[in-house]
Image: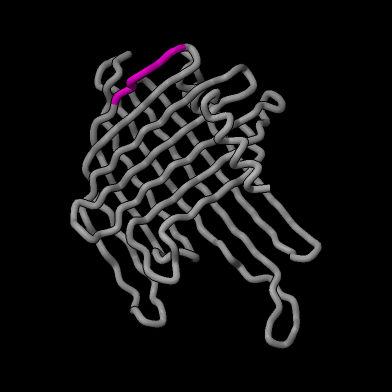
Amino acid sequence: MNSTIACAIFCLMPLAALSQESTTNITPKMPTFTSSAELGFLYKTGNTKSADFKAGFNIRHEKNQWLNLINVNLLAKKIETEDANGDDKFNTTDNKWNIVTQTNYTISPHGKNYIYANVSYEEDRFSSYEKQSSISAGWGRHWYETKTSSLFADIGPGFKHDVIKATDTQTRESNSTLIMQAQALYLHQLNEFVEFKQLFVAKYATKSNENSIFKAESSITTKLIESLQMKFSLLIDHNTEAKAPFVKTDTQTSVTLVYSF
C-alpha cells in the first residue's frame, strides 16, 4: 500500500496542488486564525498483525504584517512478534513526535520580503538521535505568486543541538553546532478540490564531521466535504551522520483525514 501511495504522489507532483496553507496564502481575504487536525490509523491482521497511528495539529495566525505557524506531529507503530516462550506480543517499532514553530514579519505592508524566527524540537525512539532541536533566524521572500501557485524561501544562521543515544559500544552524548538553515515551500492548487505542497528544509552544520539534516515532504490534499480532507504525504528525513545500526535516511508514507476548524 505504501509504495502505491508514494507512486501516486510522485506522479501527481508535476500537476500538483496543496494543503490548506496554499489556499490561505493565495486567497486575498482570509481569517486571521485557522487550525486543522489530522488523524490516520492502520491495523493489519492475517499472517502478521501491526498497528500504525499518525496524528498532527496545525495552527496559523496572521494579522497585519505578522504570520505565526505551529505544527505538531506524532507517529507510533507496533508490530506483533513472538517472544522466547512462543507467546505473541506487540513491540513498538517506531515512536516519534516533533513540534515546529515559525514567526514571519513582512518588512513592508504588502511587500514580498520578510524576516523570520524558527524553532524546532524532535524526539525519535528509533533513530541514532534521541533528541534534536534547533533555532534559526534570517531573511525570506515570497518569490512567486499566481492565482494557483506560490513559492516562499528563507535562509539564515542558527544553532542546533543533538543528543545521540547510547549503544552497546558507545555512551550517550550530545553535540551542538552552528548551522545555516534554508527552507523552500511551493504551493499549487490544481482545482477547488485538490491541492499540492512541496517543502524542503536544510540544516547544514558549519563544522566538518557534524550532523546536517535534510527533509523533504510532498503532500496532496483532496477535499471530501467543506471541512474534511484526505491527505496523502511522503516524508524523507536524512541525517548525514548516523551511528550503526541506524541508517541515515528515513521515509514515511501516510494517508490521513484532515479536519479544518
Residue range of the region highlighted in magenta in the rendering: 141-146
As drawn, 16 above or below 234? above
User: In the rendered image, which quarter is residue 63 located in?
Assistant: top left
**Residue 261 visible, this angle:** no
As drawn, 189 above or below 232? above
As drawn, 5 above or below 107? below
Q: Position of residue 5 (x, y in %)?
A: 63, 41
Q: Position of residue 194 (x, y in %)?
A: 61, 24
Residue in view at x 33 percent, y 30 percent:
153
Foreground residue, 18 or 260?
18
Q: Image check: 44 left or right of 182? A: right
Foreground residue, 222 or 169?
169
Foreground residue, 56 or 47?
47
Q: Image check: 133 left or right of 199? A: left
User: Which residue is outermost to the bottom?
Assistant: 85
Q: Position of residue 203 (x, y in %)?
A: 30, 47
Residue in view at x 33 percent, y 61 percent:
241
Q: Main secondary structure of the magenta part?
A: strand
Q: Position of residue 59 (x, y in %)?
A: 49, 36
Point out the image quarter for the C terminus.
top right
**Residue 109 visible, this angle:** yes
